[in-house]
Amino acid sequence: GESVGLHLPTLSVQEGDNSIINCAYSNSASDYFIWYKQESGKGPQFIIDIRSNMDKRQGQRVTVLLNKTVKHLSLQIAATQPGDSAVYFCAERPNSGGYQKVTFGTGTKLQVIP
Amino acid sequence: DTAVSQTPKYLVTQMGNDKSIKCEQNLGHDTMYWYKQDSKKFLKIMFSYNNKELIINETVPNRFSPKSPDKAHLNLHINSLELGDSAVYFCASSQGARSRVETQYFGPGTRLLVL
């Protein structure tokens, strides 16, 4: 079936470096993508989203890139900080009309090394 | 002010028992969700209600029964608990399932351990 997945289950990054978390999706009908951050013991928290009519969207220290040709999504975190340590999920929603559920990927754990 | 709240935060119980988890959101959202997160952190949707109407019902054992008394509340009742039900259950809400803005706001989770 359709799925959303991640290439790297764990990513270790030195504090101050940039982080790149990747996500592959297979549902070509998806038109909306979201990145969530889940800190230990907490619920997922929205970071940034992007619609399929865009290739790039920037937030505060975060950038999401969307490559529809290869069905790839990435989250870039600039100047990674210890507080960025968390599990990051990409999620996608198909545009098929009616009520559509958001499907979450398997998650990538980001470890920031001080 | 807590946007999405769940009770209890921790729930330890014996196999075969019946338990409920409650969820409330004060965001004025129309849509609420229940997710199950397993030990590998995989998040899977279970149910979704839009303004008290069930709109998403994934392949979940019928021991799980959601109830939405009003659009600000979505409770989850589980009958005859099994070991495999042990997980973290998250409630979430969003503006509306048909809305172009699909940001979901998650509660803190309920950690269920079935012994």
Image (spheres, rainbow, N blue to C red):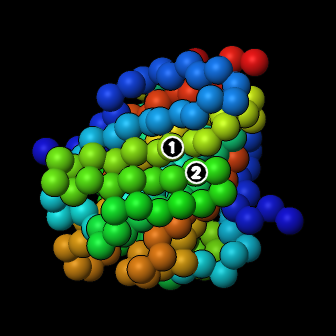
x, y percentage for residue B68?
A: 55, 71
The residue positioned 27% from the left and 46% from the top of the image is: A72
Residue A39 seen in the figure: no
Q: Chain of mark 2?
A: A
Amino acid on which disc 1 is placed: Gln
Q: What residue did someone put label 2 on?
A: A62
In the rendered image, which quarter contains the N terminus of chain A? Answer: top left
Element assignment for label 1: strand
Q: Is B99 situated above or below A41?
A: below
Q: Is A110 situated above or below B6?
A: above
Q: Chain of mark 1?
A: A
The residue positioned 45% from the left and 36% from the top of the image is: A21
x, y percentage for residue B22?
A: 66, 56
Quadrant housing residue A52: bottom left
In the rendered image, which quarter contains the C terminus of chain A? Answer: top right
Label total for image: 2
Amino acid on which disc 2 is placed: Val
In-image side of A99 versus A81 (left or right): left
Element assignment for label 2: strand
The residue positioned 45% from the left and 53% from the top of the image is: A64
The answer to whether the residue labelled 1 contacts the one labelled 2, judged by CB atoms less than 8 Å apart, is yes
First in residue order: circle 1 vs circle 2: 2
x, y percentage for residue B2?
A: 80, 62
In-image side of B27 versus B65 (left or right): right
Residue B28 seen in the figure: yes
Q: Nearer the viewer, residue A68 or B27?
A: A68
Q: Which mark is residue A76?
A: 1
The residue positioned 73% from the left and 41% from the top of the image is: B9
